[in-house]
Image (spheres, helix red, strand yellow):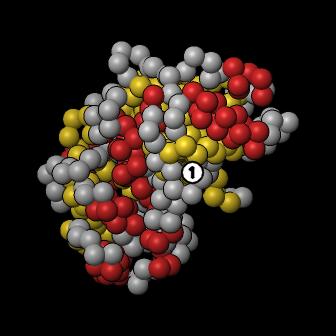
Amino acid sequence: MAGSGGLKRLAIILSGEHPTLPLSEVCAVMRSEGVAHIPVAKHDQLFLVDAGDGATDALLARSAYAMEGGRLLTQSPASIDDFRRSFDGMDWGFIKGRTFGAKAKRVRRHWEQVDTQKLQAIVGEVATRESDAKVDLKAPDVWIRSVITDAGIFTYLMDLESDRHAFSSRKPKSRPYFHPGVLEPKIARAFVNLCGVRRGDVFVDPFCGTGGFLIEAATMGIGAFGMDVDRRMVAGAGRNLRHCRLDADIVLGDARALPISKADGIASDPPYGRGTTTLGQDVREVISGFMESAFGVLKAGGRVCTASPIELRPADLAADAGFRVVEEHRMRVHKSLTRSIIVAEKR
């Protein structure tokens, strides 16, 4: 299915782990990698976007929350007859001389009356009738995926499938230095992506803790610089980076006085809970000072992504420091803690 202005329409299946972060992270990856894209529609865990060349490669290499996707072939209302008709007149040349497999799945419990096995059978029937392609359900050249979501049935040529095990292999407890309360690799990766850095840029985490954000940045080939006010964290983060066979510059220091002259992007999870330290300083004052220091070293147009309890109103602190807040997300941690995750840009 064609997009607009020479762009291809893609269907991207998003993780259901958060209602808003996955979509923002996918767009941030394409923006930072220079991939032209125009959002088309957002459905339950499905994002339609007209995108230029390199979109799926960029998402495969970087995204935490893009689960799978590819070029959109058809879309239809959620009925078997409409689904079958959606293939009328479609050019099947993309599987000429190749093998293919068909899979169908459902997001949550949408349209349970539609049988996913029947959808798979229809794709197999039409594809073999309209082309010389052969079915291979073990190792086909091409997978054709149909997904049922709230807006109907969407079928795409799957050329993006995330490695579901990559993040679990980097879980905090698998590292030599562990401290409770650190963010999981997926969300750490999302924070790094949301601040808009790319390979060759300078990424900074001023509250680096055990090094999770630095690990995700370095894994993507981004220059990583971390600091922390706690000597134990500085040493522990270094151990964790070496354990992952990655490099980053890590120093002891105060986030309110960043010892660098320039940063392309900043992401951090400042201390605000039990088991963290601000050396006796008021948390709001620390975060306010961090925002002011971040504004001073970020390049024009650079972004900072950070999280704080909603009662600290981090969006206001960012605005007070001179930033333009472009996104805010809420993440409930437990009964007494909801994080406000902001993305702010230096104007």
- In the image, residue 223 lies at what x, y percent? 21, 58
Residue at position x 27%, y 43% in the image: 295
Foreground of the two, 60 or 115: 115
Q: Is residue 25 left or right of residue 331?
A: left
Residue at position x 38%, y 51% in the image: 62
Q: Residue 343, can we see it? A: no
Foreground of the two, 257 or 63: 63
Residue at position x 52%, y 60% in the image: 164
Q: Residues within 10 Å of mark 1 (few under 14, many from 20)?
A: some
Q: Is residue 37 left or right of residue 11?
A: left
Q: Is residue 167 left or right of residue 274?
A: left
**Residue labelled with disc 1:** 136
What is the three-letter code of the residue carrying label 1?
Answer: Asp
Disc 1 is placed on an element classified as loop
Residue at position x 48%, y 53% in the image: 162
Q: Residue furthest right?
A: 113
Q: Is residue 110 left or right of residue 66?
A: right
- In the image, residue 121 lies at what x, y percent? 71, 39
> Image height check: is 216 above or below 76?
below
- In the image, residue 271 lies at what x, y percent? 46, 64
Q: Residue 339, can we see it? A: yes
> Image height check: is 87 above or below 330?
above
> Image height check: is 205 above or below 128?
below
The image quarter containing residue 50 is top left
Foreground of the two, 282 or 107: 107
- Give the position of the C terminus as an image quadrant: top left
> Image height check: is 285 above or below 250?
above
